[in-house]
Image (cartoon, grey):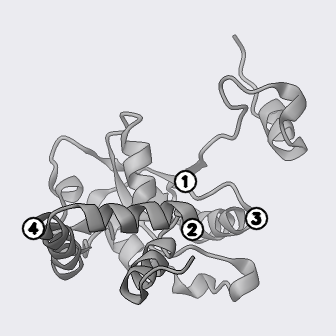
């Protein structure tokens, strides 16, 4: 059964969002039809307002409505630690762990198969941060993929000559996971990175 054309268009737009499949997109569109005109307008306005007012911090690249962002402006954060991540959602995830250093967001989901160009990494801005903040350690927190690994090695090779410690997130077994179901690469890295107890 086909939906009305405007509703079908709304379903199509929701389906473009990450993690939203066709059924969820249809549920969301039908939910929008049940809410009041005011609530629907509120959602539409919030989307437009976010698109118009949120930008990338000129210093670190994180999403913000004030430049510099709250993280860069926070005097309680450790300037000597710089965590390099691929996307803004990585900042949110790492910050939940209690990490209190600063960040640099590459704002690029690097993909080797789609013409990965490592020259797109803004090294002049990274070097400026390293110099101004007297960074002692760069923590490379790229995704544990082949692409993330290539980016991590490239960043390490480019920044290591500056005498700054370059570290990488450890890989390991997920809590609650069964060893028999863990892929070989993760298991090998877990063995290589084992700690004394």
Q: Choose mark 4 or mark 3, whichever is in front.
A: 4
Q: Circle 1 sits in a helix, a strand or a loop, which is it?
A: strand
The image's mark for residue 38 is 4
The image's mark for residue 146 is 3
Q: Is the residue marked by circle 2 packed among few (<14), some (14-19), or many (20+) residues within 10 Å?
A: few
Among numbered discs 4 and 3, the one appearing first in the sequence: 4
The percent position of residue 33, horizontal first and vertical second, equals 28, 68
Q: Circle 2 sits in a helix, a strand or a loop, which is it?
A: helix
Of 100 and 112, the residue lying toward us: 112
Does residue 187 lie above or below 42 as drawn?
above
**In the displayed image of the protein, which residue is found farthest to the front?**
1
Among numbered discs 2 and 4, the one appearing first in the sequence: 2
The quadrant in which the N terminus is found is bottom right
Q: Are marks 2 and 3 in contact (CB under 8 Å)?
A: no
- Tell me what residue is drawn at x 48 percent, y 66 percent: 25
Q: Is the residue marked by circle 3 packed among few (<14), some (14-19), or many (20+) residues within 10 Å?
A: few
The image's mark for residue 141 is 1
Among numbered discs 2 and 3, the one appearing first in the sequence: 2
- Tell me what residue is drawn at x 17 percent, y 56 percent: 70
The image's mark for residue 22 is 2
Of 129 and 176, the residue lying toward us: 176
- Tell me what residue is drawn at x 75 percent, y 33 percent: 193
Q: Are marks 2 and 4 in contact (CB under 8 Å)?
A: no
Answer whether residue 64 is visible to the viewer in this image: yes
The quadrant in which the C terminus is found is top right
Which quadrant of the structure image shows residue 38? bottom left
Q: Are marks 1 and 2 in contact (CB under 8 Å)?
A: no
Asked whether, in this view, residue 44 is left or right of residue 27, the answer is left
The percent position of residue 39, horizontal first and vertical second, equals 15, 63
Does residue 96 lie above or below 111 as drawn?
above
The percent position of residue 99, horizontal first and vertical second, equals 38, 38
Q: Is the residue marked by circle 4 packed among few (<14), some (14-19), or many (20+) residues within 10 Å?
A: few
């Amino acid at each position: 059964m086909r939906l009305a054309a405007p509703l079908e268009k709304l379903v199509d737009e929701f389906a473009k969002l990450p993690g939203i499949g066709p059924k969820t997109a249809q549920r969301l569109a039908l939910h929008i039809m049940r809410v009041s005109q005011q609530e629907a307008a509120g959602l539409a306005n919030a989307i437009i307002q976010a698109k118009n007012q949120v930008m990338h911090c000129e210093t670190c690249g994180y999403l913000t409505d004030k430049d510099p962002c709250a993280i860069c402006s926070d005097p309680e954060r450790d300037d000597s630690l710089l965590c390099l991540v691929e996307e803004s959602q990585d900042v949110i995830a790492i910050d939940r762990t209690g990490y209190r250093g600063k960040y640099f967001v590459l704002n690029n989901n690097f993909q080797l198969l789609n013409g990965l160009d490592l020259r797109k990494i803004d090294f002049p801005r990274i070097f400026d941060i390293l110099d101004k903040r007297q960074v002692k350690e760069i923590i490379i927190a790229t995704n544990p993929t082949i692409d993330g690994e290539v980016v991590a090695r490239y960043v390490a090779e480019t920044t290591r000559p500056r005498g700054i410690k370059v570290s990488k997130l450890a890989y390991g077994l997920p809590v609650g996971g069964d060893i028999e179901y863990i892929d070989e690469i993760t298991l090998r890295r877990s063995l290589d990175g084992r700690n004394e107890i």
